[in-house]
Image (tube, rainbow, N blue to C red):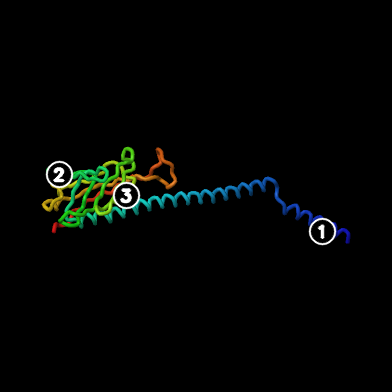
Amino acid sequence: MNFISTQFDQSWRGERRLAGSTLIEAMFASAILIMVIMALLSAHLMGLRLDQLVESKAGASDSSRRTLNKLPMDIRSSKMWNIGNISGTNVVNVVGGQAQQGTALQLYQTASGSQYILYYFDLSGSNNSNGKLMRTVSTNWNPVVIASNLINTLYFRGEDYNGNVSTLDGTSKAYKTVIHTTLQFCQFLYPLTPVGSNGLYDYYKLEFKATPHLPE
């Protein structure tokens, strides 16, 4: 009876020794656990960065869509127009016989020309690095930003059907003139990216032409 009890006790102690783990095994298990945690954190951080990128691109698309919806509609619904340059709240129109090109566009909704919608480029940013397309009306000078982060050629042009700069002003005789403008965007990669070199993402542009409505 004592022999059986001793043999059973030795077998049970051997199983206990086999159920444990060595220091090397514990180190391997810890290393694998740390690698899994790091992989999960990296995937999470990458997902956050991609989410910020998508948000910034979606915001740029929103701005582009608003511009393309509003400006062409106002141009097509106008009866007369004038292209000029803005100084403060005053617009100096380009007279007939001169090249119709400037930073401001007046759109008259009636042939009388008493009230108008004004689009103009705000070039207050240094080196035109953050130009803005503004919209306001003559009855209430309250400019609204239509598009921002604009660069390079910020002006409106009156052209003929061949794309040549027209010298006809926006009277009733020039209703066939095409108004042409190019919006070139350059925005930051992520909303929280600090301003500086290598901090910008995709450069893209919107170029469109629209013709005013036939005069009354």
Asked whether, in this view, residue 194 is left or right of residue 216, the answer is right
Q: Is residue 174 left or right of residue 56?
A: left
Quadrant into which the N terminus falls: bottom right
Residue sitting nearer the eye, 161 or 7: 161
Instruction: Name the quadrant containing residue 202.
Output: top left
Disc on the earlier residue, 2 or 1: 1
* Residue at the outermost bottom position: 1
Q: Are marks 2 and 1 in contact (CB under 8 Å)?
A: no
Label 3 environment density (alpha carbons within 10 Å; few <14, some 14–19, many ≥20): many
Q: Residue furthest right?
A: 2
- Residue position for label 1: 8
Pick the front one: 143 or 19: 143
Find out whether the residues at labels 2 and 3 contact each other: C-beta distance under 8 Å. no
- Badge 2 amino acid: Val
Callout 3: SS: strand
Which of the two residues, 17 or 81, is positioned nearer the viewer here? 81
- Residue 204, percent from left and from top: 32, 46
Please name the residue that numbered disc 2 is placed on: 95
x then y, percent, for residue 97? 12, 43
Q: Residue at x 17, y 56 (%)?
A: 79
User: At label 3, which amino acid type do we have?
Assistant: Ala
Q: Which numbered marker is on residue 132?
A: none
- Residue 216 position, x and y percent, is 13, 59
Q: Secondary structure at mark 1?
A: helix
Q: Amino acid at mark 1?
A: Phe
Q: Position of residue 99 (x, y in %)?
A: 16, 42
Residue placed under numbered mark 3 in the picture = 147
Q: Are marks 3 and 1 in contact (CB under 8 Å)?
A: no
The residue located at (87%, 58%) in the rendering is 3
Q: Secondary structure at mark 2?
A: loop
Using the image as rendered, state which of residue 53 and residue 194 is in the foreground: 194
Closer to viewer: mark 2 or mark 1: 2
